[in-house]
Amino acid sequence: MKRLFDFILAFFSIVLLSPIFIIISYKLIKHLGSPILFRQTRPGLNGKPFEMIKFRTMKDTVDKNGKTLPDSERMTEFGQKLRNMSLDELPELWNVLKGDMSLVGPRPLLMQYLPLYSKEQARRHNVRPGITGWAQVNGRNAISWEEKFKLDVWYVDNHSLWLDIKILFLTIKKVIAKDGISAQDHVTAAPFEGTNNDENRK
């Protein structure tokens, strides 16, 4: 039932939001050039890797030694606006159609973090990752990673279609209110000490 709900809602969302996809794509080409999509391998259901796609929000700027500059220095004003409105997440609807993701579930982080989770935290991968989740409507970037992981595991143990619908409505409300979004030009810290930042881990 959850998979059918995801597929139908993702399909009609892509159709209805297609003008926004076109406008964002045009502006990204104008501000950042190509490619307009950011692609990265993330852990899916049971930790199985898949390629997640998002709208690109950062420049590919490097220093004099050819090393990529920190996220905070590569973030663009237009990219920050996309993040603040969560519009950079829209291409993930294609991941939902493919079955790699769900509309609601724990946010997929980086593959390099898989060995670092505790046994309890790793249970967040017992369901498909989501575009939004229980942690995102209960604090998002305003709460600690430990709290996020606890909320993710709570969702795994309590998820239902009605809870998903509730989370989707709360997500829309929070995006409109810009509640729990990081401050301007701030890039979310990595969840584990000593690991590197990378493009958007909301």
Image: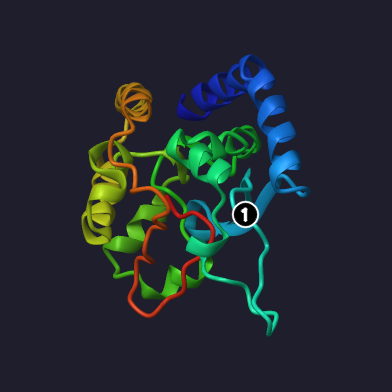
User: Measuring 69% from the left and 43% from the top, which residue is drawn there?
Assistant: 31
Q: Residue at x 54, y 58 (%)?
A: 199
Say how many tags the image has.
Answer: 1
Residue drawn 34% across and 72% down?
192
- Name the kind of residue labelled 1 in the image: Phe
Q: What is the x, y in percent for residue 34?
A: 78, 48
Packing grade of label 1 (10 A; few <14, some 14-19, many >=20) is some
Q: Taking 58 as reference, is 24 above or below it?
A: above
Q: Nearer the viewer, residue 18 or 179?
A: 179
Q: Is residue 98 left or right of residue 184?
A: right
The residue at the far right in this view is 34
Residue 2 vertical position relative to residue 95 in the rendered view, above or below: above
Q: Secondary structure at mark 1?
A: strand
Position of residue 46 measured from the top left corner of the image (x, y, whole percent): 48, 56
Q: Position of residue 54 (x, y in %)?
A: 61, 44
Q: In front: 167, or 47?
A: 167
Q: Residue at x 52, y 63 (%)?
A: 73
Residue sitting at the far bottom: 65
Q: Is residue 110 visible?
A: no
Question: Mark 1 sits on what residue?
Answer: 50
Residue 119 shows up from this direction: yes
The part of the image, by quadrant, that contains residue 201 is: bottom left
- Looking at the image, which is closer to me, 114 or 148? 148
Residue 72 percent across, percent down from the top left: 48, 62
Q: Is residue 109 left or right of residue 182?
A: right
